[in-house]
Amino acid sequence: MKWKNAVKVGLKAVAFLAILAALFLAASQLLRTKWVTQNQEEYIYGNLYDLNEDSLDVLILGNSQAVYGFSPVEMYDRAGISAYTLGGSSAALMSNYYWMLEACKTQDPSLVILDVSGLLEPFRENYERKRIDVMRFSMTKVQNILAMDGLAEDSLLSYFIPMLKYHTRWSELEGTDFGYGVNSDLTYRGQDLEDYCKNTLNYKKLIIDNDDPEEGLREMYDYQLEYFDKIYTYCQENDMELLLVKTPKYSWIGSDAAQVQALADEYGLTYIDFNWEEMLNAIGYDIKTDMKDADHLNVKGADKLSDWLCDYLKENYDLPDRREDETFDLQINRELYETEHTDAYLCSTTDPVEWLTLLKEHTSCDIFLSTYGDVAGLVDDETAALLADLGLETDLNALEAGYGFVAWLTNDGTSVEEATDSGYVRIEGTLDNGIAYQVVSRNQTDNKQSKQLINGEDQSVNTQGLNITVYDQEQDLVIETVCIDLETGEMTCVTRADS
């Protein structure tokens, strides 16, 4: 019977060690940093594993320029192209290579698009860890970690056992550490729908037409070139075509483009650089509306580039139109995508008519309005019609001199509107989500003011004209605040990028 007791003890020991190992792995997963801000690497890379097998035709690789520069959903809507972007903050080509291998375990893309920024950027370990942490354990991950030998300052063992690096994070844990997986809709096939708009950039500095191809020469890094060759070789061996692209980037210069072109010629590859003015004109680029910041497109710019690229890909590559396949699933939250897409466009236009037209399509927000100064006789017919479509019942042109006016156009189609000849008017209350609001218009001779408080914080631009704040109760988020100068027809915008 001793052997039976020994077996029982052995089984208990094995079970104990298995439970201990499972708890250790769970704790490691809990404690490691979750990359759910900035470029949303947790979801961009993590969502790859959720894709249906063999549902991907175009794999886009790169860094944050790729995340913001390409719109896979737009590519599908326009041409039925099934694409996915694997990119993130300062991603090295090493990361691009190993994630390409990871993607090809379940996918069989016929085309790989590589944004070439990484060729001229140094290796940054703190950014590379974001991608390695998200990768599932496999030989690919092992190879990726071992390839960091000589480049990484952290112990390579800490990549295998994240607890070694993150064990002190227990006091910093937040809700996202426990439930980050439930918010995977924050990205859409690798695109992060940021709505920032940088409208003060110098167009002549962006284009590289007038740059000296020898000036400011930055040598390509050997370790980036090594993995460029690996990407090329893998594509060749697996019947995948490779296309090189550079999205618009303020810090990209003529000598960068010249080096990449020489590399493309050496490998016999096509290279499309959207920093040339001809290419910017081809996509209908507008530097005042299409940039998130100096080096990244916003959603509006990404849609333009993706539309042009779709036409180019359909003409030059044999890609199926997935819209013709009734069984194909894009695997995104379409309703949320459309809402965020509209939000992003709202934050990238400075034309009042276009802005109000987009706002009319947005059915889930509350709109707060207040006047600053007199508006009577200044509202043109088109603007008045759009305001009426939004639910405004008051004829602003009928307001007499000295009147103040405020309104709350609710997300359920009703409105609260007040006007007074005393020059001061206010409405206030609590929204369904429990957030307090207050809207004020003061139109007195020596004291003019517009105020729109959401949860005690004034959102109003507070300048001459019609001040408007758009608020999403569900997200508890101010989408945008603008003021339309009714005399000049110009609009001042305050987006989250400016706050």
Image: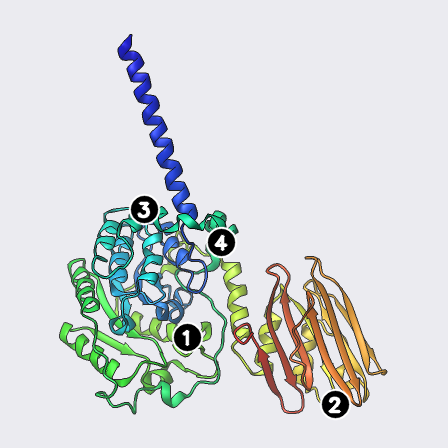
Q: Amino acid at mark 4?
A: Asn
Residue placed furthest toward the right:
422
361 to the left or right of 264: right
| Residue beneath disc 2 | 377
SS category of the residue bearing label 4: helix
Q: Residue 385 at x, y = what percent?
A: 68, 79
Question: With respect to residue 253, does 322 lie above or below?
Answer: above
Q: Earlier in the sequence, mark 3 or mark 2?
A: 3
Determine the residue positioned at 29% across, 83% down. Answer: 253
Query: How many angstroms separate mark 4 from mark 2 (CA)?
Result: 48 Å
Work out which quarter of the rendered image holds the C terminus and state it.
bottom right
Q: Compare residues 256 and 395 and report the one nearer the observer.
A: 256
Query: How many angstroms separate mark 4 from mark 1 (CA)?
Result: 24 Å
Q: Residue 299 at x, y = what percent?
A: 45, 72
Q: Amino acid at mark 3?
A: Ile
Determine the residue positioned at 36% across, 51% down. Answer: 165
Total marks shown come to 4
Q: Residue 134 at x, y = what percent?
A: 36, 53
Q: Amino acid at mark 1?
A: Leu
Residue placed furthest toward the left:
266
Q: Compare residues 392 and 11 and report the one nearer the observer.
A: 11
Q: Earlier in the sequence, mark 4 or mark 1?
A: 4
Q: Earlier in the sequence, mark 1 or mark 2?
A: 1
In the picture, residue 380 is in which quadrant?
Answer: bottom right
Q: Nearer the viewer, mark 1 or mark 3?
A: 3
| Residue beneath disc 1 | 297
Query: How many angstroms separate mark 1 from mark 2 (CA)?
Result: 39 Å
Q: Earlier in the sequence, mark 4 or mark 3?
A: 3
| Residue beneath disc 3 | 161
Work out which quarter of the rendered image holds the N terminus and state it.
top left
Query: How many angstroms separate mark 3 from mark 2 (CA)?
Result: 69 Å
